[in-house]
Amino acid sequence: MFDTSDANLVRRAQQGNKGAIGKLYDRYQEQMFRFAWSRVGDRQLAEDITGEIFTRMVTHLPEYRATAVPFSAWLYQIARNLITDVYRRQDSRILQPLENAHLVAETQESPDMMVEHQLTIEKIQAALETIDPQQREAVTLRFLTGLSLREAAETMDCSVAALKSLQHRGLQALRVALK
Amino acid sequence: MTDLEELFQQRIEQLEAGEPLAVCQQGLPAEEAALLQLAADLRQVNAPARAPEQVAQQRAHLLTLAADAPASRTHPLTAVIAWLTARPVAAGALALAAVVVLILGIGLWPRPSAPAHEIAQEPETGAAESVPTAILPAPGAVNNVAETAVLTDPAAIAAVPTQTGSGLFLPVITSPLVTTAGEAALQNVRGLVEVQNEDGSWTAVAHSALVQAGQSLRTGPLSSASLLFHDGSQAALGPQSEVAIAELNALLPAEGFRTIVLSQRQGVSHHQVAFRGDNGSRYEVQTPTGSGIARGTKFDVSVPTAAPARFTVTEGRVDVSQANRTVSVTAGQTTSLPENEPPTEPAFLVTGQGEVTAIGADAWTIAGQTFAINASTVISGDPQIGDVVYVEGHLAADGSRVADRITLVYTPPLNQFMLTGAVEAMGAESWQVAGQTIAIDQNTAVAAGIEVGDQVRVTGLVQANGSLLATAVTLLADGETRPFDFTGVVQTIGAETWTISGVVITVDSSTAIDGDVAVGDTVRVQGNILEDNVWRAATITLVVPDQATFSITGPVETMDPWRVAGINFEVTPGTLIAPDITVGDLVRVDGRILPDGTWVADRIEELDDDSWLEIIFVGTVDGRDPWIVSGLPLVTNEQTLIDEGIDIGDLVRVTARIRPDGTWLAVRIDLLETEVGESCVTITAVITQIINNQVTLSDGTVITLTDALNVTGNLQVGSVVAIIACVNEDGTITITEIIVIYNPLPPTPTPVPGTNPPPPPPSGNENVTICHKPGTPAQQTKTVPQSALGGHLGHGDTLGPCP
């Protein structure tokens, strides 16, 4: 009964309805920011990327076709492309050398320390960069961005079953990378 | 998927449901338990909270970008990659944007054409590495050029070398319409646009006309046009503007130096100047009190009748001179030219759009920001508190904002209604339509020939006299004609046809023409669009431009942009658009014609067999289960479209259909994004009890009626009222006025949240089937309320379906 579908908002947005565009922004800005931040680890850069994601969204909305891919998947694809661009241009600043991450990990005094002290976003990013991109995406969406299984599957344009496999294998790979 | 993965997923779900990690790990192999630990650890990594002001700024920028979307589509990536990769500059841009803009606004001409950061970064970046092959001019200009199909030919667009230090990129566009450097083509003609003849007289000209040096051009009210020069530069004229082409030799770079000199005598103009790196080229705009020279930029020139001329730059730089002094006005800045004085020190431009929450003699509050008002401030459209306006101004030396121009964008649809249905009774002061009592007064525009039983559309205001007040009552289309009603400027007057704001109108001996109408006058024209798409006028009446409105009926031709009955129009967030309209639907569009001739829809109503008992209104949500809006219980079903996130107290727009049993079935409920100002707010409520001077509202609030409290209308139990509440400086709230919006007739039981919709009304609203206009081409089987049967039979309809 509730008109909560992205499709309806997107359709209105494509007609130039600014209210719909605003609602799409409201709906996804936090997700996009978390996604960007979990990938670049820099708050201001994540803010910039988030802004640009939606700028591109508006710019390219006329080209979007709901039948091709879910809207959220399309939006995340924009985010991925942007982050890739940023990595390509600013890799020295964003990417921490993996050995440094290991170094940080080895300096932890106790396995009982608070999780947030052990698992810094820099370590996670460094480890994530070493695993399979699909698995990285699944882990990022599920556990760092906070999407549900269904949302993450929709975003990755895959089945829920496939997503379950990806997240499981992604966690396995990430655990190895973090060791 | 393996069993282990399935098991792991089950435990993940338990974890997400809030069960302790240790519980979720029980029974898992050590490896899986460790993975679950990792998943839990990852979920604990909290992202920093976003800065609310940055979110708001991004959102505002996005909405501005949406308004300028046609121009934006061609420059999406490069500018922002530069923005991302030039972080210090981006930060500066953001800071500058925060200071300079509420974000460039939408809608009204002249509109800024570049996003805030693009403007802000230009002076420093150069951005050479990310030059797009073509960045199109502003939206209006894109449309202009597209009409000539120039941009469909890639060969006709060439990127201009980057201007060092400015980051400005404009295409060189060679137009087949502009055959020589000494001519300019008139484009995007709206309303009355005239060229001066050698003898000093003026002649109306059309799209694509060519003009030369020595000629003058002027626009009438509700009119605008642009000049496309041979080198791709463009000058757009706003309403009531006049420009002389002093010199024109718009050579391309390969051909020699460009010279374009315009003398603007009055009005407003917007310029997009193709960049030239040579020192011999000139693009100059002269005003009565000074001039500006640009090499490649975008800027606006305003020459008001009672205020100094003003140059406002949106891209690049313009050197503005007067009284032996030149100032460089850069992107985001503005300067004025007082008579016999040097240009004022350039100040940063402040533009934006928002709700007016306070109007004072010296200052207005718009979108929560205070803008100083002075004698030079131009205020258009008579905006009032609650209206959404577009504001242009500048930052004064002391940091305060000064408004240079405030233009009404739209009036939020609060307390407006639109109702369609059968006329059941017609009295001198009120009518009964679709079971509703509609007040009629001397200002109500009532279409001729309406009889009891006819299907009509009523638009109006919920206000003062205890019932809905109609501002217009029109007959619904029967198929053979489609009514229209609009206000425009007369361009030509012929024996059989007139041209009014670009629309060819057929007149005949039956057309009632009020007064001595001449070319250039603003008139209201009403009539019907015939089957062959001929617009036949019934009446033509002189009006003042401020009353420029329109109403047209026809099939939707396109929705992006909107086009109905051959008329392009725009929609705003305030436009009431009936749900699920698609191309081909028959609709009625009501709206306003802006000063530049742009048609903006206020309402788009679908006309079909199902719409005749439909009502659209705006109110406050009192309850959601069941839905009650402004005290009116609504029935919802699986087809009802309801925006997410609606809370009690929110302002919503309801599209409902009045069912035969008298209940209101909500077709959709849209959340209205209305920002409540800091001063006064309007709250809608239902009166549930009145004892002496104590009025109890549906939410339990008790208001004591005092002499200081202004009450308009007849308060009674069941009345829907608008309550004007103002926030005092000390934070307390004072109720200043109660206006009766609606007194249901016959009285309905007092709605109480949580109760069912109202019971069926008395008999008389059962539907009966009739044959409407039997034996005519418009013959149609219809279902009408029994209460309207008498009227239908009275004008020849017959009971039962058509044969």
Image (tube, rainbow, N blue to C red):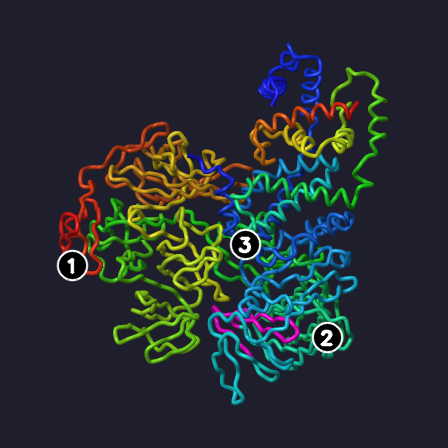
- Of the residues shown, which amino acid type is indicated by label 1? Gly
* Residue highlighted by disc 1: B775
* Residue highlighted by disc 2: B253
Residue located 85% across and 30% down the image: A100
Tags 1 and 2 touching, CB below 8 Å: no
Q: CA distance from mark 3 to mark 2?
A: 52 Å
Q: What chain does badge 1 belong to?
A: B
* Residue highlighted by disc 3: B360
Please report whichever mark, 1 or 2, sits nearer to the chain's N-terminal start: 2
Q: What chain does badge 3 belong to?
A: B
- The 10 Å Cα crowd at callout 2, few under 14, some 14 to 19, many 20 or more, is some
Instruction: Classify mark 1: helix, strand or loop.
Output: loop
Residue located 73% across and 41% down the image: A45
Magenta stretch contains residue B738: no
User: Magenta part of the protein: which range?
Assistant: B217-240
Q: Are marks 1 and 2 on the same chain?
A: yes
- Of the residues shown, which amino acid type is indicated by label 2? Pro
Q: Nearer the viewer, mark 3 or mark 2?
A: 2
Residue B464 percent across, percent down from the top left: 34, 48
Instruction: Classify mark 2: helix, strand or loop.
Output: loop
Location of residue B27 with respect to B253 vertically, above or below: above
Q: CA distance from mark 1 to mark 2?
A: 71 Å
Residue located 35% across and 44% down the image: B741
Residue B184 percent across, percent down from the top left: 59, 77
Residue B520: quarter of image? bottom left
Please report whichever mark, 3 or 1, sits nearer to the chain's N-terminal start: 3
- Of the residues shown, which amino acid type is indicated by label 3? Gly
In the image shown, does B528 or B419 lie closer to the viewer? B528
| Residue B21 visible (yes or no) | yes
Instruction: Classify mark 3: helix, strand or loop.
Output: loop
